[in-house]
Image: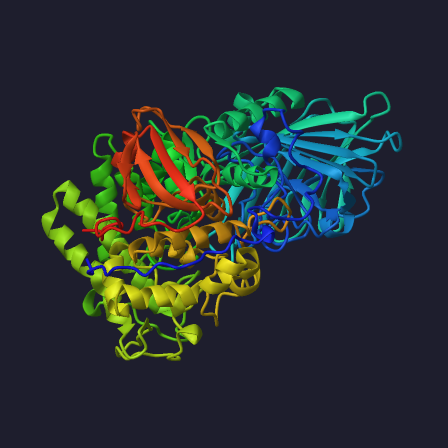
Amino acid sequence: MTPRTRRSWPRSWGVLAVAALLGTGLAAPAAQAAPAGSGQLTDLVNPFIGTENEGNTYPGAAVPFGMVQFSPDTGHNTGYDYSENHIRGFSTVHLSGVGCGLGGDLPVLPTTGDITSTDYAKYAAEFSHDDESASPGYYKVGLKTGIEAELSATRRTGVQRYTFPDKDTDKANVLINAGQSLHKTLHTKVEILDSRTVRTAITGSGFCQDTKPYTVYTITKFDRPFTASGTWKGDTVTAGSTTSDADAERNGAYVRFDTSKDRTVEATTAISYVDAKGAALNLRAEGGRSFDAVHRAATAAWEDRLDDVRAQGGSDTLRRTFYSSLYRSFLAPNIGSDVDGRYTGWDQKTHRAKGFTYYQNWSLWDTYRTQAQLLSLLAPRESRDMALSVIQIDKDSGWLPKWGYGTVETNIMTGDPVTPFLTNAYQQGLLKGPGEAEDAYRALKKNADGVPPADSAPVGREANKEYIAEGFAPYIKDRAHVKPGDSDYDHGASATLEYALSDAMLGRMAKELGHADDAKRYAERAQNYRKIFDSSTGFFRARDAAGDFTGPADPAQSEGFHEGTSWQYQWLVPQDLPGMVSLIGGEDAANQRLDSFFAYDRLVADPARTAREVWVNGPYDYYNADKYNPQNEPDLIAPYTYLSTGQPWKTTDVVHAALTLFTDTPTGMTGNDDLGTMSAWNVLSSIGIFPVQPGTDTWGLSTPVFEKVDVTLDRRYYPTGGLTVRAPGTSDSARYIQSARTNGAAYDKTYLTTDDLRGLRDLSFTVGGEPSRWGTGADAAPPAVK
């Protein structure tokens, strides 16, 4: 570790401006918290947060980790945009915060009158947010057509209730659109099985680029017989028809009810990624209940989940943003297996999960940094099954995933995110079943030391041959993509850093499992971040195939970094921050660079304004910047670097400023939520415990924003059964840790390990208005991974 020098302490630290209050934002939209004193945590959740300005969340109904996410689509490529005022349909599949279109399968829409159009962009219904509301597991909207629509969900079904107006009572329709989705549809089939039931099969591909096709099977059962029905194909509507097949064109069915005596129609839609039988089994197991019963059960499931974290103190706005983030953290990954355990593997064959629930949808480049760790704390049983599902993908298809959607690999994003995801599961004690850790290790070793075969879908560590031979992944500009998706060669510099991070985490796992030679080899490779450090600039730079530094020398204009610049990626060495600090020139030089990166002087004077005007440039503006970008994944750990440079109070300053970007309005997300990644950052940073070395068991500490947080933990993994985090008096003006205590004993380090957490009942902070010497001792910082 780099020797520490005595710090010089600021003479004055101004009280922050009122505008910096955490969670400051505009008035909230219609669906908001219940009146104070209701006692329901679900009333604090606003599902509309992030539905505007490319947060790409959805407001519809789902249960924790459910297969179905029943939500309205307004025309945005990922589903719902708060700025739009027409709903094209309520569809069954959505992912929270993705950047490209996928899902949106089977949009259904109630209408009245004759069927005059088969294009959902044309028959879309106008609505107003004044007539719209949402809460966990429930969505409701009044359409300008006079129809009220309500949605709820179980794990594998979406339940809908439509209340029709007193007009066209003999022509109350539900349009079931199989041919239009958020992704590309390749083939669809519609079948009207009887006077209550419609079945579909939808084959599509997509998500940023074309992928291998996948199929979603659905079956929708109504609570009463319809009086008429038919199908459409293209522009042609055929009354009385019961089947319709189509390739890449519009295809669907309509059913009609007489609502002169009963204006309400309910239906349940079950889905399966296996076959029509699977959808029918899911419907039989989870259907058959009234809409109100499903709604009550969904709300109870969310209340039970949210109740594991009880936060006290803070403003109403802060509590709403916190619990809304906690809610979004539990939306994915999603159940992929049917009620009989069957699922479609990445080999496109049917398998059966035995002893665990199979999950799918893996935004690993994002979630390995925050959400995986949060779930390991709050949902360890599900997290274990998620880890086993990822291992099973290797067993089924021959390789581990990078960015998996449904039953296919998309190869979106770069590096090696699956390694810290699985090593985190191992380090958190989730892989203790017979052979589980070794199964994970074998798959990870194959991934770390090789490249997938040319005839397989995954790209894996695409630049591994060069990385292993030369110590870096080359940046090869304009190289043709061999497989769909992103290429590590397009982002050689950041891929090198991600590979090295993963090598460190795998090396530690190898060491603990007794694979000494592997451990030594991976530990050496973990130092490969040094191979792309340009001492002439003092920053990381991409190298070309010949090994020469390439691209602009200006680190703010650098090339070869995925969704970021060298300024932002320089801190992505969590496995060896002491070594990185030494490369920069020592702690003083590192702190000067960190201060510049965070615009620290401006931040202290006006944190909220600095966050919005200096840090944030736009949801997709990743490049040409020398400042912190809190909207994107490469920078998520960066504020915690100060824990390793002897100035831990600055971590709190930066984190609390970044938290002001989360508000309880539709624009209240910091960029794409990426399947709960940004939301999990908010939750963990608000509690004051953050995974500073993703893939290990190390948690960095900062000042909580709540005076008290009671966290319920699963006794199978955490024997104490719970942890209380206290920070009496914490506020904008009193946010600096003066001292800390664990179970009543003084604690001077800036981090905890998972083993510490297993025996910890109480973590208490004394806070004040000035920085202190807490956490500045020689052994206070998180150690390098060895």
Tell me if residue 418 comes above or below residue 290 in the rendering: below
Quarter of the image for the N terminus: give it. bottom left
Q: Is residue 186 left or right of residue 485?
A: right
Q: Position of residue 348 (x, y in %)?
A: 41, 44
Report which quarter residue 471 is drawn in. bottom left
Q: Nearer the viewer, residue 784 or 716?
A: 784
Q: Position of residue 138 (x, y in %)?
A: 63, 31
Q: Specify whether residue 647 is in view.
A: yes
Q: Specify whether residue 346 is in view.
A: no
Q: Nearer the viewer, residue 572 or 322?
A: 322
Q: Nearer the viewer, residue 224 or 634?
A: 634
Q: Is residue 583 left or right of residue 628?
A: left
Q: Position of residue 777 (x, y in %)?
A: 24, 50
Question: Quick one: which residue is furthest to the right in this view?
Answer: 167
Q: Is residue 388 left or right of residue 215?
A: left
- Residue at 30% across / 56% down in the picture? 646
- Residue at 88% across / 33% down in the picture? 168
Question: Quick one: which residue is furthest to the front in this view?
Answer: 11
Tell me if residue 739 comes above or below residue 595 in the rendering: above
- Residue at 61% across / 20% down in the picture? 288
Q: How many dots with numbers?
A: 0
Report which quarter residue 527 is drawn in. bottom left
Q: Position of residue 243 (x, y in %)?
A: 66, 38
Q: Is residue 200 left or right of residue 637?
A: right
Q: Nearer the viewer, residue 197 or 633?
A: 633
- Residue at 43% across / 73% down in the picture? 556
